[in-house]
Every structure is written in structure tokens, then in C-alpha cells.
Image (cartoon, rainbow, N blue to C red):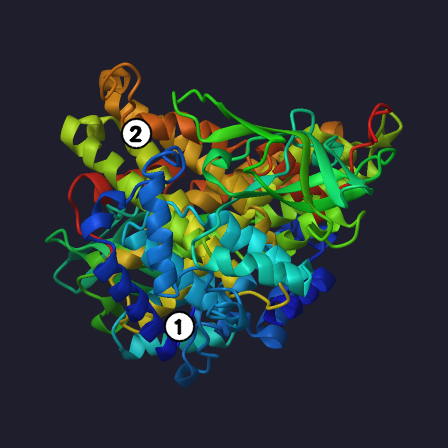
Amino acid sequence: MLKDTSQSFLAAKADSMAVRAACRSSQHFDAALWRSVCNDMYWQGVLVPEVHEGLGLGWVEMAIILEAAGERLLTSPLFAVTQSTALLNVCLQSAVRDRCLEDIARGQIVSLALTNAVGSWQASGVSVSDSGDGLTLSGEARFVPFGFAASTLLVVASNEDQSTSIWAVQSDAVGVRIEHTPTLDQTRPMSAVRLEAVAVGEAQRLSSDAGQLIEQVVALSRILTVADQVGVAQASLDISVEYTKERSQFNRSIASFQAIKHKAADMMVKVESARSLLYFAACIADAWFAHEATDAALQEAAYMASACASDAAFFNAGSGIQMHGGVGITEEYDIQLYFKRARSTESYLGRPPEMREAIACQLLDGGETWS
Amino acid sequence: MELTFTAADELFRQEIAQWLDENLRDEFAEVRHRGGPGDEHRFVGERKAWERRLAEGRWTCIGWPEAWGGRGASIEQQVIYHEEYARAGGPGRMGHIGDTLTGPTLLAFGSEDQKARYLPDIRSGQAFWSQGYSEPGAGSDLAAIRTRAEFDDGSHQWKITGQKVWTSLAHESDFVFVLARVDRDSVGHRGLGFFLVALDQPGVTIRPINQLTGTAEFNEVYFDEAVCAVDDIVGAPGDGWKVAMGLLGFERGVSTLGQQMLFQTELDEIIRLAKLNGASRDPEIRQRIAEAHIGLRTMRYNSMRTLSGGEDGSLSREAMIYKLYWSSWHRNLGKLAMDVLGPDAELLEEGPYELTKLQSLFLFTRADTIYGGTNQIQRNLIAERALGMPKEPRGSGAH
């Protein structure tokens, strides 16, 4: 039901032409489509609690929508605001947190400045210092999803004692500079955020000791990314099979050749496996927010789903180009767009070998056991 | 996505778990964890006795209707049964074919007389069955079978002549069901009959096939005017293909979760060894162990999606990938076991050719990707049925 409405909305509003136009536009996305997503579908509010004007739905619903978004290469800040919502939902209640959630519900773009110059979240590129006149933030965050379009940035920073804090910073505050960084995958635009002695007050602080919280948010962000990847993997399979049915060589549809069919079957195995792990992980995320699953269970679910879905998306998009033959490498056909999105999502917050190594640590090095 | 078990299901779980705990001991202690794939030839007598013990507890044929001695168990209860059976280390079921193939086939397509003659002995663990589908010239192309069945007006019996192959445990079984050609001039899946044939008769010769494991679980079965009664054909002459294939549509994968528990035991053993011998420090081995772990969990959630799906018995997309998925996973696990063992992988348990459990796993899992529809056939099925891709044009020499 939700799947059907999501798919038909996007089919009407985010077809290949629309995606390409968004990528070419000076804004790097389609602002009118985003307004429609917010006003007509209310997807930005799916994970926002009802008391903050959201829908207060769960992670399974969110996964269904993001899967549909991946299928259509949606070029909109949906992932960015959903990631921010995930973080805000994990933060303790505060006035600033509530205001940010309400901003998101109203369609404001709130982006998470989580990763440093090399894309790692383990050491922030932004630091907090106390100049005597008050606290300031300085440094750089990169790979910030839709930062250039954000009204508010959620900035992860290192405190002087090496602990981590999170701050809500208006994008037009003095000392904030945000640049769009052109990307290989134009459907997921990113920004570099530079902060030069940006004054912040206690009222902007979302968390003062966020080390563990960041790990939780990274796991949740992986699950959101997996949903997109499952959509990419499914669409890559679907459009490639469709193409091979239409393409004729040796007087027959090339879809009747086993060499093609077996590749397609392998692609279906990949995407169905990734989908099973996605919906498992989404269930775990819901359970985790309800205090019915441990941190370790959440991490494991995210590692597994991410490893599997990253592989699935890249395998399917890459195989899809091969199935398209020569036209697969043209600008005109969409499979190249999926290929690029598969690659950009694959390296976001850790590649599959890192996910597997994290699991190996648990299995082989006597780490905490999973239930 | 999780299967939901009712309170009644949980009582059922307690009941089977307790029964297994009380019965899978003493004279049956030695068959625990035995007789699985690659080990099916072991403890045959003990495992037949175990079938009769199961039957006393009404733990055979639980999916059958109560009228025929089953429990009419729900999908959920059957899943629980397989899980608890695997958890308890229940031995490979000698009655497996009768319970899950012959029985359901007769229940769906058999006459009342056939049900009355054959079902009780299957249920009670008295009669053991084997299957006669494949032939030397009919493997993946099953419809190419050439075994013939002719009705002999004089003796008023069917006479069967031909050869079946890959008939597991035929030498330990009492009956075999045989797919044979009733119309001499027919080709393909037309003109076939489905016959119920006793193995202990002069017209039947059974020869074991020695496998790469040094063991022989499979057989060739030769029929030279072997006989069965006029009413030992299931369905009408010509309906054989429909009867043989009929079951596939009902397969909901109730045994998959139990199977996965056995896989978990194997993976746990490999992890234990890797920690013990230091292979756990090898970065490549670490990746593969993690991959195996993820794969096993993937199978579990695939099964959950399948089992919690529609009640119409139709195969969902995730069900269609299951055979290809588990067989490839298991084959890779066998190789992983060898690589974790390192040089020790070469050393036999004892001469002349007694394999360790992991060596047997390594060798026997090469069969997993072949029997029950090769990985190539599975990919064809997925492409054609799930993705709607056209069939390969048939060669001119084919039916």
C-alpha cells in the first residue's frame, strides 16, 4: 500500500527526465519536487514524532519509502533530513532538539555535518574552543548531504577533553561557509562545511558527550542507506531485464540467452537477500528505539545489511551496464546513473569489507555476543 | 517479518522438545547428529528403529491430516518441529521420503485404496521409500525419461523396464515410486505414469554408486520387467508428470529453518577451529567467516519472509532463490572449512579413506549445487518464472 503510493508518486514526479534536470540545475535538486514531497506525501515527517508535527511512523515505513526513492534515483534532501531526524530522535529532549524536529516536519532542510575531510566520523574535523567570550566552533566537515541547501546544520565537534558534542548551527550564522562539492554521483549532492570561530551557545547544544550516540546514528544511517541501495539494486535489475527483452540479436531476444538469464538470476538473488536484511534491520531499529534491542544488535543488523546491500547495488548496476551492451555506457540510458549511485552509497560510512571485519571481530575476537 | 507463534505453538514446542529430550537417549544416544547428508549410509538399522519410536509418539508425518495418523500441523508447527528436531540433534530421517513425498503425493492424487494400503506403514515407520525420478539420460532434463511401463493383460499387472539413478538409500528401502513412460511413442512430459513399486522382487537390481567421499548413499536401480499391481499407478496413465510435479507448488520451506540450525552448527565448529589454530587472524579468512555468518542470517530472514507470506501456496520471489542460495552458501562453507584447517585439511581421520566431518562436508557439498535442480537450472527457473524472461529455444534433437 505505502509501497504502491510511493512508487506511483515518484513515477509521476521523478522520472528520468526530472532526475536529469535536477542534476543539471544550479540548485542541484528540484525544489518544487521537494515541496511536493513535503506537502503532498509528508515523507520528511515520517520519523518525526507526532508531538513535533510529524507522523511518528516506524523504520519499516521509512525503509519502504527510501527504497522507492532509490528505485527512482530521487534527487532530493529526503535522506539528509531523515538522517538528521534519526539523530534528533536519539538525542535527549531539549528545546533545540524539538525545534529542529519541527523545522524538519515543516519542510526545512536540516543536514548532518558528521564526517571529516577523509569521510570518517571517528574524529571530527570541527573542534569546540572556549575563547573566554564564549564557545566557538572551528574546522571542517565534508561529505555533508545537501549541506548547501540546509537552513540548519547539525555539527559534530570535538570538545577540548576529546569527547564529542553536537550543535545546531544556522547555516547563515557568521563564520559558516558551505560549498557544494561536485560529485561523481550527481543524484546525491554533497557539501563541504567550513566553520571559522562560529559562536555557539548552550541553547544550541544537542548533546555534550555524544561518542556512543554517534555510533548509534552511524548504524541508523547505514540502514537508511541500505534502503536506497535495495531500490538501486532492484531498479538496475528491472531496467536491464526489460532492455534485454526488447533487444534482439541472432534473430532472438537476448533475454532468451542463458548467459543473460543467469546473470539476471544472480542479480535477483542479490537484491532479495539485501531486502531481507534491510527489513530485518528496520525491525531491529524499531525495536531499538523501543528499548527492546541492544546497541550490539542494532550494530550487527546494520553491518550485515550494509555489507549485503552495498554489494548487491554495485553488482546489479555493474551487471546491468554489461547487459545493456554498448548503450550501457551512454549518457542517454539510466543504468549509468544507478551505477554511480551504487558506488557513492557503497563508500558512504564504510565499505563492505569494513562491515565484515566488524562482524569478524565479534565472532572471532571474543567481543560482546549478539542475542 | 518475524514469524509469530501463538501460545498453543509454544506449548507444541515444549511438547516436542521434551519428547525428544526423553527419547533421544539411551539406545538412541549414538544416532544423535548422525545420518545427515554425506552420512546417510550410517546407523541405518538404528535410525529405522528411531522412526518407530517417533511413530509411537506420533512424531512422524505431522503435516498429514489426523484421519491418516498425522497431526494436521500448521506451517508454524511444522517449522517448530524441524527447529526442535535439529536443535536436539535428531538423526537424518529414514522416513523422510515417505513422510514428505510419497505421503503428500498420495494424499493429493492417490485413490482411497492406495492411501489405505500405503499410508499407515509410512506413518508407523514400518515401510521406507525411495524416489525414482532421474535416469542416466534424464537429469536436468527430467522429462527425457525412458523407463517404460507396460500393462500386461495376461498377469493383469504393470511391467516396468528401465534404469533409475541417484536413488538414495534404495538398498535400505522397501518401495520406490517410479516415473515411467506408459505410452511408448510419447515424448517429454506427456505419456508418463507414476508407479508405486516394491523393491524386493526379482525384476529389481540395486547397485550402489561409490562417491568421491568413499561412501555410497546413492544407487542405480535397474528394472527388468519389475511388476506392480494394476492399481499401483497414481492418477491416470498419462498423468505422471502432473503427479510428480504437483508437490512442488505446496513446498513452503517448513524444513528450511531446521536445516539452517545444522548449518549453524557447522559454522560454529569452523569458528571454533579458527580461533584454536590461529586462522582467525588471517584477514581473508575473517572476511569469509563474516560473509558466511551474514549469509546464514540472510537465509533465515528469507525464510521468515517466505513463511510469513501468502497462504495460497504460491512460491514467492524469495522462496525461488532459496535452493540456489543455500547450496552455494553450503558449498562455500565446505571450502572455508578446508582453508581454516590449512595443512591439516589433508589428514584423514583414519585409513583407508575415513573422512573427518569437515572433509565430508567439503566433498559432499559439491553435490548440493547439483541435486534437486542444479544451480544452472535454478537460475533458469528464476529468470523465467520470477523475471519473465523467455525460454531458451529447444534444440532440434529434443522432444
At a point 61% along the width and 66% down the height, the residue shown is: A3
Q: Disc 1 marks which residue?
A: B5
**Could one spot residue B343 in this view of the protein?**
yes
Locate residue B41, reporting x and y percent: 38, 34
Q: Amino acid at mark 2?
A: Leu
- Closer to the camera in the image, B236 or A226: B236
How packed is label 1: few (under 14 Cα within 10 Å), some, or many (20 or more)?
A: few
Subunit ID for the residue under disc 1: B
Which image quarter is the C terminus of chain B in?
Answer: top right
Task: Name which residue type carries label 1.
Answer: Phe
User: Which residue is labeled 2 in the image?
Assistant: B358
Seen from this angle, which residue lies furthest front?
B154
Q: Chain of mark 2?
A: B
Residue A270 visible (yes or no)? no
User: Which x, y percent locates residue A68?
Assistant: 60, 59
Quadrant of residue A326 in the image?
A: top right
Helix, strand or loop status at disc 2: helix
Q: Is residue A116 left or right of residue B25?
A: right
Residue B367 in percent (x, y) is at: 49, 30
Please tell me which of labels 2 and 1 falls first in the chain.
1
